[in-house]
Image (tube, rainbow, N blue to C red):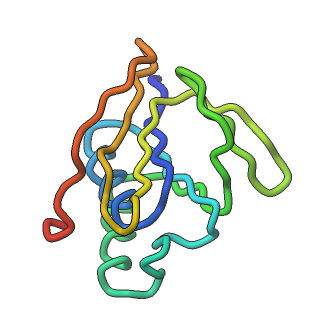
């Protein structure tokens, strides 16, 4: 089995990215907050729809876990009662001042970063 893509950040961009990636790859969504939604909140209709889309796509949620350190091909994650290295491809979806930045993914095979722009918020 290939390493999953780890999407760090369960806000709107992370949820959308995870749902989209999961149509072709195994995906785990990591966030330090124990509920999805990030700063957008967890109970809005838009977030609820994104969470359902991610679940339908087969995304595995790792909420309440913190991404601590990335090395090519693996991510150190700390959660309640454990710290572990996860083999992975990784996507970071952190936004700057409310504006999505390009997603940065690293291939497990090469360790080289690959950037692409997230979809417009209007397409979610």
- Looking at the image, residue 72 sits to the left or right of residue 109; the answer is right
Q: Residue at x 67, y 55 (%)?
A: 65
What is the count of numbered marks? Answer: 0
- Looking at the image, residue 124 sits to the left or right of residue 80; the answer is left
- Looking at the image, residue 103 sits to the left or right of residue 122; the answer is right
Question: Furthest residue to the top?
Answer: 110
Look at the picture and state if 1 lies above or below 85. Answer: above
Residue 113 in picture, x, y percent from top left: 38, 25
Residue 10 in picture, x, y percent from top left: 47, 62
Look at the picture and state if 70 lies above or below 81. Answer: above
Residue 13 occupies quadrant: bottom left
Question: Furthest residue to the right?
Answer: 81
Q: Residue at x 36, y 77 (%)?
A: 47
Question: Furthest residue to the front?
Answer: 97
Q: Residue at x 36, y 51 (%)?
A: 18
Look at the picture and state if 41 lies above or below 78. Answer: below
- For the residue pair 103 and 54, the one nearer the viewer reads as 103
- Looking at the image, residue 118 sits to the left or right of residue 52; the answer is left
- For the residue pair 62 and 111, the one nearer the viewer reads as 111
Residue 95 in picture, x, y percent from top left: 39, 59
Q: Residue at x 32, y 51 (%)?
A: 101
- For the residue pair 50 and 68, the one nearer the viewer reads as 68
Question: Furthest residue to the bottom?
Answer: 44
Residue 97 occupies quadrant: bottom left
Name the quadrant of the C terminus: bottom left
Residue 27 in picture, x, y percent from top left: 43, 43
């Amino acid at each position: 089995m290939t390493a999953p893509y780890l999407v760090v950040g369960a806000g709107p961009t992370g949820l959308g990215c995870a749902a989209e990636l999961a149509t072709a790859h195994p995906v785990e969504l990591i966030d330090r907050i124990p509920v999805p939604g990030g700063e957008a909140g967890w109970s809005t209709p838009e977030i609820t729809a994104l969470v359902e889309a991610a679940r339908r796509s087969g995304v595995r949620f790792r909420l309440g876990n913190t991404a601590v350190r990335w090395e090519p091909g693996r991510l150190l994650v700390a959660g309640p009662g454990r710290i572990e290295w996860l083999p992975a491809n990784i996507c970071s979806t952190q936004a700057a001042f409310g504006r999505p930045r390009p997603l940065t993914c690293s291939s497990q095979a090469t360790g080289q970063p690959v950037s692409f722009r997230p979809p417009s918020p209007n397409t979610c």
